[in-house]
Image (spheres, coloured by chain):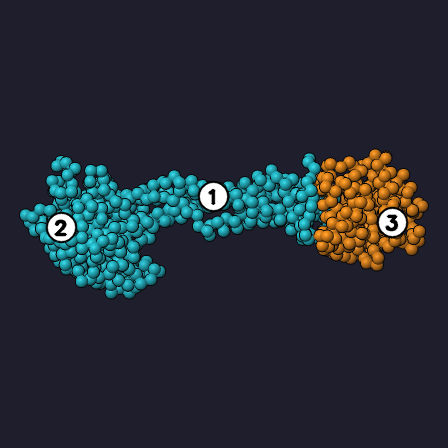
Amino acid sequence: MYTLTGVTRIYRKGRETVTALAGVDAVIADREWLAIQGPTGHGKTTLLQLLGGLDRPTAGTILLDGKNLAAMNEAELARVRAASIGFIFQTFNLIATLPAAVNVELALAPLGLDAAERHARVAQALDAVGLTNRARHLPAELSGGQQQRVAIARALVKEPTVLLADEPTGNLDETTRDDIIGLLEKLWRDRRLTLVIVTHDSTVAARAQRTGQMRDGRLLFNGTAAAASDEQP
Amino acid sequence: MTRTSQSEASRGPDGSLYFTYLRLELRHRLRQAVFIAAGLAVGIALVITVSAVAAGTSNAQAGVLNKLYGIGTDITVTRPYTPGAADAGKEDHEINPGMTGFEYLDDANQGMFGAATAASIASLPGVRATAGMLALGQTTPSTGRGNPAIPESQAPPTTLIDAVDTADRQLGPLSEVRVISGRDLTAADADADVALVYSGYAKAQHLHVGSVITLAHHDVRVVGIFSSPDVQGNLQEGGEFLEPAGSVPSILIPLGAGQALASLPSEITEVYVAAARTADIGAVASKIKAQLPWADVTTSASLATEISGSLGTTAKLAKNLGRWLAIAVLAAAFAVAALLMVAAVSRRVREFGTLKALGWPARRITAQVLGESVTIGAAGALAGIGLGYAATALISALESTLTATAAAAPGTSEPHGFFGGANLRTGQSFHQTTLFPGTYSSTPVHFSAPVAPGVVVLAAGLGIAGGLLAGALASWRAARLRPTVALAQAG
């Protein structure tokens, strides 16, 4: 479970300062599917990066299962990301030189598993996204939808508790989008994940349990920025 | 883009992911990797080649010094000829007037000095041993035996004779020769009319152990035939015998006998000095110079600086131009490798951001980038070693022959450290004009470029160091990337 209190993120761009997040308060329950929408530049991706421990807030606390990500150093955040958080990106972010299976296996590298365990998990993950027969293909040999499936397999192979997706269908056509969202929904249910999706697509957002709107660095539910204690579904 | 094979995708035991990633990444950037490795290889090959050439010139110089100077000798003391000096009065003085064949004529090359000088030098601190030597020469009439091919109009050849101290076999001319038949000269032969004859001379003159040769109208018995490892045979077409190059004379006789034959009972032309310790050579030379201000005191080091000719030129090229060229190329290769690695990392920013998002710690990303650059460096080292070996093998295969020329010492007209006060009946140059023209003496030296194992280790180290250097900056940049910034980079 995430508990966000007064999360603020201010960037410096030359002499200017940009407030990406302006005191976000929210609670995201375990196994919740939350969709975050909002105009470009209003802090959606920044919030997702803070939830994923890719960045630290300028102020405020982000508790993940009781541990404050805002107070962790880079090495501690890396350990949390390696063990508990899976990422899915709009542009898939597969490494072009590596076959699909190796791309998936990269997520297991920090966990210290032996090779047999890694290979078994990779096979399971690729099977879960329906790409067993594409394990040895390079990303360039796969369609956009297949590449995103590999990215999903990579995010899930370490069996995280949280899955964070930044515009996961942004580069896909409608049919493929529906396939991917269907897959994510299935995995969310089967694996009892906490799923946070940032999306511009209302169709995708409509599939989520709850939708928040980012406006000027604030997260609004039903038009209001609710207190953390009020946000559990 | 080609479909990857099963072997490419297969991964072995734990830890193989690192190498799989490394291998596939390098294969993907093969042209760039080859370019970087080739640059390092050229630099490393140059280091090997220059080192080998330097070692070759060093070996050649050592060989030349042995020829010119004598194994076991640290210092030589000679006296430059100065008109009006004490021994100048001996010029054109005929010993045993009326005799033919063995006459003393100072050739205005080096002066003589008292044999007691050797003893006085021996008493100096740091001196282990000394040996005096009197260099003599005997002209052979043009109609004489053994030289039928020499026309009457030409100057008669001179046979070089060294009258040597037989007490110390390890010092002076005796140290340079190896008796191949008969016996050696011993301390007991100090005043005996016995001789060692150089093998080439013996062949030309049909001499053997037990033969009798005539020196200054005295019979001298040949007790041994010697050869010198540094001197090639000098038998020419037609049976003409040319004096061996370097300081090896045709005939060696005991010092006392030589002084008696030449009627110079207390004169020598050279003192060979062995220092107690190698480190003391310079100090001992200084003390000798202080005690004998008139003397030319030569060490092997000072003689080495006077070697010129193509050997000297090669040595200078290897030492100066070659060394700096190798350093410059190596530095350039390192710099280019580092820049290319940094550029490669810059193009992979989003990849590293993704790895950070997957939970890869900075040290693991550093290790991955370093692994790639060290692999390139190692490949460059291997290629460089191969290239270096090929270059040195080519140099050696060319069988280049260099010449070493020793310049005359100041105040003398003879090469420093060469033959002592040589003598000619006619006053001509003591040395063969064909081999030692003018006031310089040249000797041919076969040149080869040996690669020392230490240089190969150094080359391998340089390659890996180059890879580390190139990768260090790149991996440092990769590791410092903030994940959010890295992920924001365009793919």
Q: In the image, what residue type sits under mark 1?
A: Gly
Mark 3 closeness class: few <14, some 14–19, many ≥20 residues within 10 Å = few
User: Residue under circle 2?
Assistant: B213
Regarding residue B91, the answer to whether it shows in the image is no
User: Residue under circle 3?
Assistant: A190
Q: CA distance from mark 3 to mark 2?
A: 114 Å
- Which of the labelled discs sits on residue B388, or is there none? 1
Q: In the image, what residue type sits under mark 3?
A: Asp
Residue at disc 1, secondary structure: helix
Q: Quadrant of residue B340?
A: top right
Mark nearest the camera among 1 and 3 is 3
Mark nearest the camera among 2 and 1 is 2
| Chain given the colour orange | A
At x 76% / y 48%, what residue is drawn? Answer: A122
Q: Between A46 and A180, which is closer to the camera in this rendering?
A: A180
Tag 1 and tag 3, C-beta contact below 8 Å: no
Q: In the image, what residue type sits under mark 2?
A: Ile
At x 14% / y 54%, what residue is drawn? Answer: B221
